[in-house]
Image: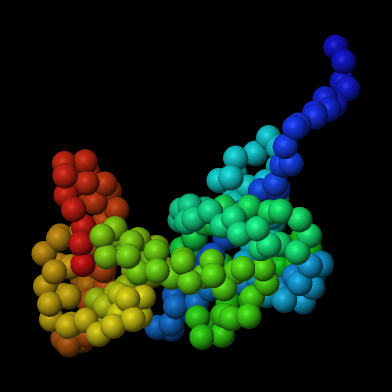
Amino acid sequence: MSSTKPTFSYEYPRPAVTVDCVIFGFDKGELKVLLTKRGIEPFLGKWAFPGGFILEMETADECARRKLAEEAGLEDLYLEQLYTFSDIDRDPRFRVISIAYYALVKSTDYLIEAGHDIEEAKWFSLEEAYALAFDHDQILSVAIERLKGKIRYQPIGFELLPEQFTLPELHKLYETVLQRAIDRGNFRKKILSMDLLIDHSENQTDRHARAAKIYSFNRDKYESLKQSGFYFEL
């Protein structure tokens, strides 16, 4: 059986295809993004999102998860395809189309490690994340708008919080992501009426009467309700 690598000839030029991953984290009441400092040209020394070229025998999803592991040491996280960016001159080397993803992580859960061709990996506030490499400023803008829309009708916000949290922490997360004030009483009433939170306050041995209760998200119950037509909306 021949082991000779096949060669191909095409009538039309073929653009390269990459993935870029916008990673959101929520820490100390602030929404952040993970950026990596490029160790190679182009844009040597500039901050960018983790990403890279899709291998020939690899799907875009597989590439995204591989690059997250290789460049930032991130695994087993919420990941969703965002948008395809195909401007002609988005890469100074040659024609490159990028399939962008966004990911949500509990940022304090991970020890970020800079990987291959990366000098450093670091969390930035949204105000600090600008003048990025390639067209990553545009990618970030699209990702923020997608997150703002999606968090209102799917419980993806819980991916950004610790396993156990208080209602004030959840309320702060929604205000931060949506970038607007939300009435605390109405928010509390709405979220508790869904009956999707598990109350752990009985296990708070040092809890005083007015202390905030500790909850966790009942993911199994949500999945079951969703199958019967339940619609999450905040």
Observer-nearest residue: 178 or 216?
A: 178
Relative placement, left or right, of 165 versus 131 is left
Observer-nearest residue: 71 or 164?
A: 71
Q: Residue at x 55, y 46 (%)?
A: 61
Q: Position of residue 216 (x, y in %)?
A: 29, 64
Q: Is residue 67 visible?
A: no
Relative placement, left or right, of 137 versus 159 is right
Q: Is residue 87 visible?
A: yes
In the current view of this chain or complex, which residue is farthest to the top?
A: 1
Q: Position of residue 138 (x, y in %)?
A: 54, 70
Q: How many marks?
A: 0
Establish if 233 lies above or below 28. above
Q: Position of residue 80 (x, y in %)?
A: 46, 53
How did the renderer colour the structure?
Answer: rainbow
Q: Residue at x 54, y 66 (%)?
A: 139
Quarter of the view holding residue 151 = bottom left
Quarter of the view holding residue 145 = bottom left
Relative placement, left or right, of 20 versus 223 is right
Establish if 173 lies above or below 118. below
Observer-nearest residue: 104 or 148?
A: 148
Q: Residue at x 85, y 12 (%)?
A: 1
